[in-house]
Image: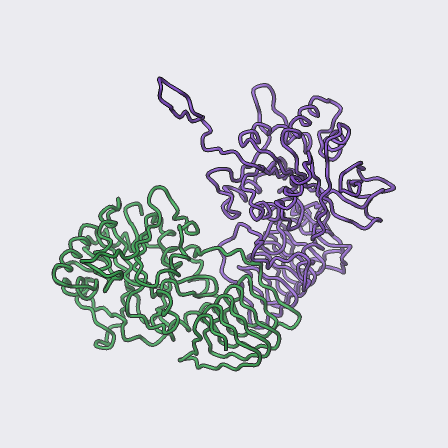
Chain colours: A green, B purple
Amino acid sequence: MKDAFGLIISGNEEQELRDLTMIRSIAAVPIAGRYRVIDFYLSNLVNSGVNNVGVITYRNYHSLMDHISGGVEWDLSRKRDGLFMLPPMVQASTNSGFYKGTAKALNGVRNYISRCSQNICILHTDCRTIFNTTYYEAYESHIASGADITLMYNTTKNTLKKPSKSEIRIKTDDDGRIVDMFRYQTYKQSDQICMDIFFINKSTLIRLVDDCIMKGGSDFIQDILIPNLELLDVRGFHYAQPAYKIDTLEGFFQTNLAFLDSNIRYQLLEESGPVYTKVKDEVPARYSKTSKVANSLVTDGCVVEGSVENSLLFRGVQVAKGAVLKNCVIMQECQIQANAVLENVILDKKCTILRGRRLVGTESYPMVVIKGSTI
Amino acid sequence: MKNNYEDRTVCVYPLTANIRKKETVAMLLAGGQGSRLGALTTKMAKPAVPFGGKYRIIDFALSNCTNSDIDTLGVLTQFQPLELNSYIANGQPWDLDRINGGVYVLPPYMSAKAGEWYKGTANAIYQNIAFVEQFEPEYVIVLSGDHIYKMDYSLMIEFHKKNNADATIAVQTVPMEEAGRFGLMITNDDNEIIDFEEKPENPRSNNASMGVYVFNWDVLKQHLIEDEANPGSSNDFGKNIIPAMLASGDSMYAYTFNGYWKDVGTVESLWEANMDLLNEGSPLNLYDSDWHIYSRNPVMPPHYAAKGAEVSESMITEGCIVEGRVDNSILFAGVVVIKDAVIDNSVIMPNTLIGSNSRVNYSIVAENVIIGNDVVFEGGSPSNISVIGPGAVIPDGSVIPEGARLSAEDAEKL
């Protein structure tokens, strides 16, 4: 896909992952043992042969910058093109250090967009879907149909959870043209979910953004796409593989646990190409005489002495003797001390659970422990 | 370089302008076949052999260099270099992709006058004098790529400088009864080397040479040139260079290093060094965040332990799938242990599959092996380890005798 470049908006204001997104953008949220959400987006682009990727950051982008750095791990550290981190520019007249809306963000990186030597923009207006794909087919369909904008959607068949309020559904006519878009709350009939991924010609994009900003708009979907559905030829591309939304905590929790299924793991981590991530040079995971493990994913650097069931242990987690974990998502460098019991719990990074403590959440409302807490 | 040209000062950059002077250059000897490792090294040099779940033997020497702030090194390859070349590549995993310096793989080459293989360890450095000279170093540290150890070379170089030595040799104190297997340094009270013995019958010392040398480059270069001119020499550091330096009265010191150090020259010692990692409080601490051992990472998901899996006292790496039982073993990346298979006291290298109901015991199974269903490894003990060579396919129901050494070709006849 020589003529395409990728643009990723790494999360916006509407974040519903509670404490997990307080300190970081959704793109930087750890997931599936050793990845961050943005790894899926970057890997999909790289595996599609896209070598020019811009990442637009909102506020709280330290964590994301730290993770992506120069882009070496995704093979995006290049002389020709490569990775471009696009943090908000502080300009007295136009913005105050962060973007209020995706259209404003696009306006903020107008120079980057117009400088790209490729003509088709693969625009990701959010980072809240976990999927593994290459874009060849969608790209071909965009070119062949001659549409102004091609929108990727999936259907409720390939989802895990109850829809969230902010989820956007689409309505297509018989020719595959998109005639309307709604929030799920207001229009429950459609089973077609917008994946926040758009193929759009560079010059069209710049024209639409300019027009939108002039009229005081701020959001790509609300203020650019929806008002122009009649004027523009906007078409859908049906993505039929699993694509799991993590826009609610329940969705995030269930998506993590879904990786325990070997078919889903294969579809999300291997089928269309590997998912690249930052290398940490951890030691292989280590088990002792007392360890018990069943139906779990365990990452390098872990030391397991207790019992772990239906859970994901991220890098460098320590589970002491007698501790019992069930249905848990335990992020990097957490320490679970002896005889602690955890069920339906998400621990953010670097938490310590002291001896004998008992934390229990429920499947639909897991308990979340904020980064660095000691309980 | 500054020149005066018609009253102006102009800078004339040499062609090699991007090469800057370095105080120390490391030369890593990685050409050995390691023939005692049998089937494990028929297709790769010993330093490329997988070790400890996610490493290769050479990662230890490379990581030691990085952690000791040595950023310029030549890796001398000769035997089956393909695996090693592609593994090291640009040196990025070890932070050795540098603008000034970095890692260079140096195979033997042809020149206008002649071309030849590396005849010995000293000859390998001799043939690369021009490589070292580019960096105009004060010191050269010569390392061996087939030892497992964590060592801060910068402390040894400090010691070398403090003594104003011409050469410093790292030694390890070994039990007197084993001393006869090593090259031994006889020292005075100031650690000055007064004599040297290569594998003597009646050892006079238990300071065994580790094959880690620091030299003043000028002195070493002189000796390398003289050694090359001597047709009777076997061009070896231990046999020729060190005795010659002693004879010519150079100032030589022994630097004692008593941390974990293992030469994994045999199948049994390779197995043992792997098993050392499983000991709690292992003398080789890999969890030291100030002394990471770096390696080239395969891109694989976390490992999956299925319902019914039993894992105890083992190390398991990313990409593995465990459905059976694993005890006191090390699984490398991408190993699959099917339901009801049992692995005890074994080292299973990358991307190997162990079929259902098979029992693997006291073995090293190399990479890309397929062990069928119901295969039984008989007996075995720490002094009698079975080896299955890379790419072997073991048919269902085979019985592997104790201490077997099977290459892929041998396995076809099963």
In percent of width and height, residue A107 lies at 21, 56
Left or right: residue B390 versus residue B194 is left
Q: Residue at x 24, y 53 (%)?
A: A109
Kindly indicate the quadrant of the structure image that contains residue B217. Answer: top right
Residue A236 visible at all: no
Outermost residue on the right side: it is: B202
Q: Residue at x 46, y 77 (%)?
A: A345
Q: Nearer the viewer, residue A259 or B91?
A: B91
Q: Residue at x 51, y 40 (%)?
A: B102
Residue A54 visible at all: yes
Left or right: residue B139 versus residue A29 is right
Kindly indicate the quadrant of the structure image that contains residue B118. Answer: top right
Q: Nearer the viewer, residue B348 or B129?
A: B129
Left or right: residue A158 versus residue A150 is right
Outermost residue on the front side: it is: B7
In percent of width and height, residue B302 lies at 51, 62
Q: Give above or below for B200 relative to B380.
A: above
Number of labelled discs?
0
Q: Give above or below for B274 relative to B80.
A: below
In percent of width and height, residue A28 lies at 39, 62
Q: Give above or below for B104 relative to A102.
A: above
Kindly indicate the quadrant of the structure image that contains residue B239. Answer: top right
In percent of width and height, residue B152 lies at 62, 48
Left or right: residue A52 versus residue A201 is right
Q: Nearer the viewer, residue A220 or B220?
A: B220
